[in-house]
Amino acid sequence: MNMPLKIVKIGNSAGVVLPKEMLAHLDVAVGEMLSVTKTPSGIELRVPATDFDAQLTAAREVMARRKRALRELAK
């Protein structure tokens, strides 16, 4: 799916409006979150993993418990 999108001013920021066909292709609705990733050829939009927040919380807990070991490994 390749379609041109116009950049519009939104307050002090800028954004693009996703057409309904693109929202349907991503299987998302207005108000849901998308993940944006920089790739060698541009950017990629995708629906974030449903368990990403839980994984991130667990990783932060481990990093907090093992702060000293991680600091030593980073040397």
Image (cartoon, rainbow, N blue to C red):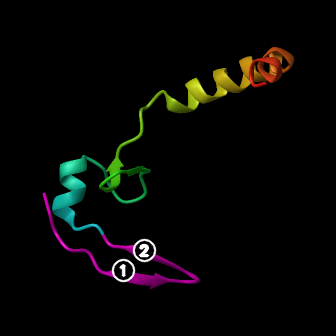
Nearest the eye: 39 or 32: 39
Q: Secondary structure at mark 1?
A: strand
Residue 19, percent from left and from top: 22, 68
For the point 24% across and 46% down, the residue is 27
Compared to residue 30, the image places residue 6 above or below, namely below
Q: Position of residue 14 (x, y in %)?
A: 47, 78
Was residue 15 drawn as part of the magenta stretch in this picture? yes
- Judged left or right of residue 72, residue 56 is left
Q: What amino acid type is highlighted by mark number 2?
A: Gly
Q: Is residue 23 above or below residue 49?
A: below
Image quadrant in which the C terminus is located: top right
> In the figure, residue 57 lies in which quadrant?
top right
35 vs 63, left or right, is: left
In-image side of 38 versus 59 (left or right)? left
Residue most extreme to the left: 1
**Residue drawn at (56%, 24%), measured in percent from left and top?**
55
Callout 2 secondary element: strand
Asked if disc 1 and disc 2 are in contact, CB closer than 8 Å, the reply is yes
The picture places residue 31, in percent across and down from the top left corner, at: 43, 57
Q: On the image, numbered disc 1 is attached to which residue?
A: 7
- What separation in Å lies between label 1 and label 2 (alpha carbons)? 5 Å
Span highlighted in magenta in the image: 1-17
The 10 Å Cα crowd at callout 2, few under 14, some 14 to 19, many 20 or more, is few
Residue of label 2: 15
Tell me the quarter of the image containing the N terminus.
bottom left
For label 1, the crowd category at 10 Å Cα-Cα, with few meaning under 14, some 14 to 19 and many 20 or more, is few
